[in-house]
Image (cartoon, rainbow, N blue to C red):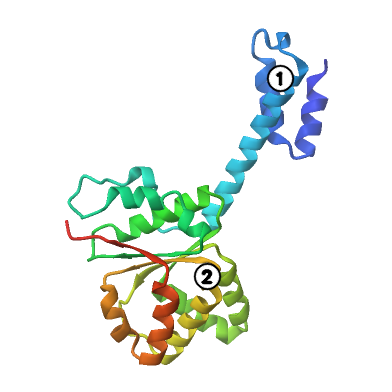
């Protein structure tokens, strides 16, 4: 059997996983003793695995996670008050499927961003699309988008994201424009998509930090309603 033309056809058809698996099969002693159906099944399994890996890599690239973090790498031995059972339960991403939110609070240096990125990475592995942004970057991007006509397009992209990870909330008071933008984002996502927020500021201080009482009520209603909470204490 002339294998090279077959390999070329598989590559042309973008079946690189099958092409690689076929080459590997040709080097396995006794492979011809297997049935055609079994060998074909192995080729298809390899192709599927390659495609799933490629899709995951694409999701991770688009997520722009700040840290290379994974749930499996979380160290529960440090005295940070982490509830291991809660973290592992949230790791199944059922809360993302149910369009709930997740709020992680705690002082600087306790690993809030790492946790957020670990949950984001796990969501990518569960085939959700994810986007990570620091709050300052979020407002900068929105401000620039208003100037070049991309504002509505940017809001639409946020609305379509399964899990929006917003890091470092509450570092500064929000102005009127930022309050409006934040509410627009949360309104588009409310009960439809999930938002993960990290903050040094305890949740009971958020109302004052937002500034405008009416806007604060609206923002917190959409954010805290159906939100899971992880409070990380100092090391």
Q: Is residue 39 above or below residue 109?
A: above
Residue 212 percent across, percent down from the top left: 36, 92
Among the 4 quarters of the image, the one containing residue 34: top right
Cα separation, mark 2 vs mark 1, equals 45 Å
Which residue lies at the image location 24% right of the left edge and 60% below the top edge?
Answer: 232
CB under 8 Å between discs 2 and 1 = no
Q: Is residue 170 left or right of residue 17?
A: left
Residue 142 percent across, percent down from the top left: 51, 80
Residue 129 percent across, percent down from the top left: 56, 58
Which residue lies at the image location 45% right of the left edge and 77% below the top edge?
Answer: 222
Which residue lies at the image location 49% right of the left edge and 53% below the top edge?
Answer: 123
Q: Is residue 219 above or below residue 47?
A: below
* N-term-proximal mark, 2 vs 1: 1
> Foreground residue, 143 or 166?
166
**Could you tell me if residue 229 is visible in this image?**
yes
Q: How many marks?
A: 2
Residue under label 2:
191
Q: Residues within 10 Å of mark 1 (few under 14, many from 20)?
A: few
- The C terminus sits in image quarter: bottom left
Residue under label 1:
38
- The N terminus sits in image quarter: top right
**Could you tell me if residue 69 is visible in this image?**
no
Q: Residues within 10 Å of mark 2 (few under 14, many from 20)?
A: some
Q: Secondary structure at mark 2?
A: loop
Q: Is residue 220 above or below residue 92?
A: below
Q: Is residue 38 left or right of residue 5?
A: left
Q: Is residue 1 left or right of residue 189?
A: right
Q: Secondary structure at mark 1?
A: helix
Residue 214 percent across, percent down from the top left: 40, 91
Which residue lies at the image location 40% right of the left edge and 56% below the top edge?
Answer: 117
**Mark in front: 2 vs 1:** 2
């Amino acid at each position: 059997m002339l294998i090279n033309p077959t390999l070329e056809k598989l590559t042309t058809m973008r079946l690189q996983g099958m092409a690689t698996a076929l080459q590997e099969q040709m080097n396995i002693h006794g492979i011809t003793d297997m049935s055609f159906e079994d060998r074909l099944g192995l080729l298809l399994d390899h192709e599927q695995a390659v495609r799933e890996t490629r899709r995951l890599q694409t999701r991770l690239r688009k997520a722009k996670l700040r840290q290379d973090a994974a749930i499996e790498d979380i160290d529960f031995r440090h005295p940070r008050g982490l509830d291991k059972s809660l973290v592992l339960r949230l790791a199944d991403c059922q809360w993302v499927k149910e369009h709930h939110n997740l709020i992680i609070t705690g002082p600087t240096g306790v690993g809030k961003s790492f946790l957020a990125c670990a949950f984001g990475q796990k969501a990518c592995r569960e085939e959700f699309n994810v986007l990570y942004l620091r709050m300052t970057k979020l407002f900068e991007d929105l401000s620039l988008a208003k100037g070049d006509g991309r504002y509505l397009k940017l809001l639409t992209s946020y609305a379509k994201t399964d899990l929006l990870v917003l890091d470092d909330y509450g570092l500064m008071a929000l102005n009127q424009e930022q309050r409006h933008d934040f509410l627009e984002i949360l309104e588009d996502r409310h009960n439809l998509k999930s938002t993960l927020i990290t903050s040094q500021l305890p949740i009971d201080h958020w109302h004052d930090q937002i500034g405008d009482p009416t806007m604060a009520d609206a923002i917190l209603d959409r954010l805290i309603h159906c939100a899971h909470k992880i409070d990380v204490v100092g090391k």
